[in-house]
Image: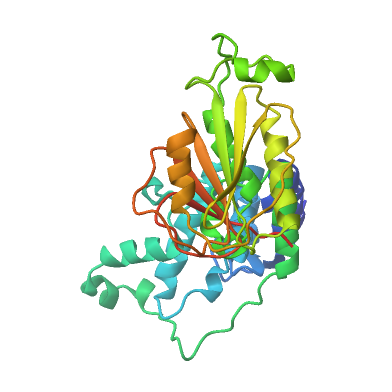
Amino acid sequence: MTSKDKIKKARDRLILEEPYFGTVATTLKLQDSYDIKSFESNGKNLIYNSDYIDIIDSEDIEFILANGAMHSILKHNNRVGSRYVKLWQLATDLTINNILVKNGLSLPLDANFEDRFDGFYAEEVYEILYSEITDEDLSDDETFDEKRSDEVQEEIVEDLDEEFLEQLLDKMSRQGTLPKDLKLLIPEYFSNKIDWRDILYRYIASYAKSTFSFMPPNKKYLYRGIYLPALSSDLLRIVIAIDTSGSVDEKLLSIFLAEVQSITQQYPNYEIDIITADSKIQSHQVFLAGEDLNYEITGRGGTDFNIVFEYIDRYIDYPTTLLYFTDGYGTFPNSEPSYDTAWITPNDIEVPFGEKIILDII
């Protein structure tokens, strides 16, 4: 078996075991060279020494392929700027290899790895490494004598097709096979494209209880033929506030409510309070497990967020979390409530507290 065949066989195995890394690795062009001792990747080519490939096992080659794939995904060769190239390459390897180890790939003995850099961007790792190197090291060691100029750049490696990467990310996200920490290290693919359904699920799932409350039934719901335990701190109570000032249309709202209902159907012990408001409270409806989330939009005035928080304090007992569906433009409260708040908005606005979830529905 030739060294190239050995690499292709390892690549096929990587596709089965780690489909994201394996799929991207198929875009790397294999290039044999005796000018290097082991291997290197610029994000487009995987350059290797055949003698080195012959003496390592398949797991090591899988790691090498995944490493090359990540250099391509993270566009490291195009992010050097005016940094010392060799030091930048070390920083990017330390960043990538932490991700690969966290995702279960076996670390080769000679691979660059320091667990102190877990979750770091390559730029952060570079600055730490640079701060640990003295001026004397930089002047005496040939390893750091090559520095890229911002004005006179070396050949820029052509990026992978954006559509290919985004389709792959979407597919792996849906299948639940997206590698760990990828969202942290590829912010350009996820900023303003946050999967708000996942965040809603996390909000709800974090409070959902695996046991039922056996308190006496809540009498106010018996006439509807529903036996529900009286409200206690063990009952999940979600408050959804809907900004009806005119910038939230019914199409977006219907998608949002449909997702909320599909998530909450997994838990039998919850109430959902839906509040519509602009500059004043327009309506307040309570929905129970299994009920359709029917609603009407009224209002279309200005936006004052304070009134919703004041209303919750006065009329809603033990709210678990507030999901505020809004365009984000209005008067915010000065103080943070005792419950968690998520601002769900299509606009990247500043919020005074809570989590901002940016909608990206096309």
Q: Is residue 61 shown above or below 226?
A: below
Query: Which image quadrant is residue 228 in?
Result: top right
Which quadrant, please, contains the C terminus? bottom right
In the current view of this chain or complex, which residue is farthest to the bottom?
151
The residue under the point 37% across, 47% down is: 336
In the rendering, at what x and y percent does residue 153 appear? 51, 86
Q: Is residue 223 visible?
A: yes
Compared with 157, 163 (above or below) is above
Q: Quadrant of residue 43?
A: bottom right
Instruction: Give 65 or 260, whichever is nearer the viewer.
Output: 260
Image coords of residue 232 (percent x, y): 49, 19
- Residue 356 lies, with reference to residue 262, above or below; the image says below
- Asked whether residue 112 appears in the rendered view, the answer is no
Residue 324 image position (x, y, % from top left): 55, 49
Residue appearing at x 74%, y 43% in the figure: 258
Number of disc labels: 0
| Position of residue 88 in the picture relative to residue 242 (left or right) | left
Name the foreground residue: 245 vs 43: 245
Residue closer to the observer: 37 or 113: 113
- Horizontal side of 78 relative to 86 (left or right) equals right
